[in-house]
Image (cartoon, rainbow, N blue to C red):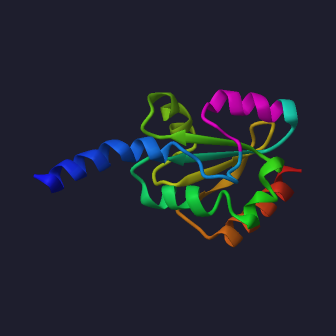
């Protein structure tokens, strides 16, 4: 019985903790349309992170990749949005970018042009390299 109670508490708590971002994370928004507006205003490309609380690789990237020293240097060069695919508001952008697996990280220019995507987890160094390439494409 104690194991069952512990499992229930963990199942309830996981989504609560999954919503938190560790120190050093980029300033993630959670609204797709607001991210588009901010990108136009600031003339920065967008990183749309399609994710879910139950996705192990998504949570791993949240904890180890986005706040990493390799990626921190690039935080201010992008508008960041963390879009939970389990929220109804994110269904339209998920369909637009053909999200089939998560984490699905979509790169979009300030003008709305598709700059490519990455599906699946990666290391901090590899992700930083990808972001550098996206910045070149965005110019």
Q: How many marks?
A: 0
> Residue visible at 71% across and 48% down?
26
- The residue sitting at 68% across, 65% down in the picture is 127
Q: Is residue 32 left or right of residue 17?
A: right
Q: Is 84 left or right of 107, judged from the image as shown?
A: left
**Image-quadrant location for residue 61:** bottom right
What are the residue bounds of the magenta stretch? 27-40
Q: Main secondary structure of the magenta part?
A: helix
Task: Give percent across and percent down for residue 40.
Answer: 82, 32
Residue 139 within the magenta-colored segment of the rendering: no
Query: Residue 83, how many percent across, how many down?
Result: 55, 40
Report the residue that reaches farthest toward the right.
Answer: 139
| Quadrant of residue 79 within the rendered picture | top right
Q: Nearer the viewer, residue 63 or 34?
A: 63
- In percent of width and height, residue 112 lies at 75, 37
Q: Residue at the spot x=23%, y=52% of the render?
A: 6
Residue 30 lies in the magenta-colored region: yes
Task: Look at the picture and state if 96 lies above or below 115.
Answer: above
70 shown above or below 102: below
């Amino acid at each position: 019985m104690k194991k069952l109670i512990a499992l229930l508490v963990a199942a309830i708590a996981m989504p609560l903790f999954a919503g938190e971002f560790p120190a050093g994370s980029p300033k993630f928004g959670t609204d797709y349309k607001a991210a588009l507006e901010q990108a136009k205003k600031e003339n920065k490309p967008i990183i749309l992170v399609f994710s879910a609380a139950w996705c192990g690789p998504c949570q791993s990237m949240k904890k180890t990749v986005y706040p990493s020293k390799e990626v921190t240097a690039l935080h201010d060069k992008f508008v960041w949005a963390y879009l939970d695919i389990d929220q109804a508001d994110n269904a339209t952008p998920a369909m637009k970018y053909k999200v089939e697996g998560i984490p699905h990280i979509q790169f979009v220019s300030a003008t709305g042009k598709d700059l490519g995507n990455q599906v699946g987890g990666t290391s901090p160094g590899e992700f930083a390299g990808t972001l550098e390439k996206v910045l070149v494409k965005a110019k």
